Amino acid sequence: MELPPIVQTGAAVLRAHATELTPAQLATAEIQALIATMIEVMRDAPGVGLAAPQIGIPLRVIVLEERAEVVSTLTEDELREKERVAFATRTIVNPVLRMLGETRAMFFEGCLSVHGYAALVERHHEVEVTGLDEHGSPIHWQVSGWPARILQHEVDHLDGTLYIDRMQTRTFSTVAHVRDRFAGRTIAQIRAELGV
């Protein structure tokens, strides 16, 4: 089966408010197939999260994961600074996000729907999400660090918001330039150089 393409910025579906699913809709073969497809598209990209609007479906469904094999390629300093940890694939339907505390963190983000670019984005350090899993069971997940960033990014997609709406504009760059220019440097060093 050929995977659907990832919709790129400029498409109307990325700027619309996605529609909630009822538990009855979630139980259908069509929605279960959508979730499986979203996971395949996310992994094929590869990415750490995907929202249904990113494949042209205006529904409030997100999938996310951080694979151990990816995390294992990062340095100890990167893991500590970004608080990246592996976690199993999660599907969240009708997610409701609540920001916890006042602590925020700024790191580079990219997006499969803004292909090839990245910028510094400030996000809440800790969040909790409620919603339904792929079987319609209620879920509650409280998380901090990188998983919290992924959640905020993906839930934004369901409300028609892209990271470019939240970015520090003077840091917007190609992924290649970010990698070449800032690899191995701390976010504090990068922010000082860029004046943000």
Image (cartoon, grey):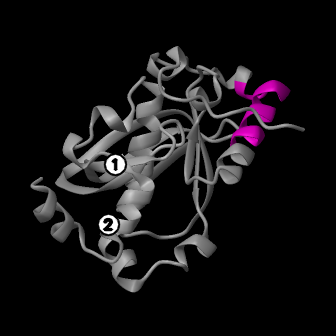
Query: Which residue occupies 44% across, 58% down?
Result: 176
167 vs 148, left or right, is left
Horizontal and vertical percent for residue 166?
27, 37
CA gap, disc 1 to disc 2?
Answer: 10 Å
The main secondary structure of the magenta stretch is helix
- Whether residue 34 is in magenta: the answer is yes
Q: Is residue 142 visible?
A: no
In the rendered view, tell whether residue 184 sits above or below residue 33.
below
In the rendered view, tell whether residue 12 sits above or below residue 132.
above
Q: Which residues are magenta?
A: 26-38
The disc labelled 1 sits on which kind of residue? Ser
Q: Residue furthest bottom?
A: 76
Query: Which residue occupies 47% across, 43% down?
Result: 111
Query: Which residue occupies 65% across, 47% down?
Result: 42
Horizontal and vertical percent for residue 186?
24, 73
Secondary structure beneath label 2: helix
Query: Which residue is label 2 attached to?
Result: 181
- Quarter location, residue 193: bottom left
Residue placed most toward the observer, 119 or 155 = 119
Q: Is residue 73 visible?
A: yes
Residue 173, numbered circle = 1
Query: Which residue occupies 54% across, 42% down?
Result: 112
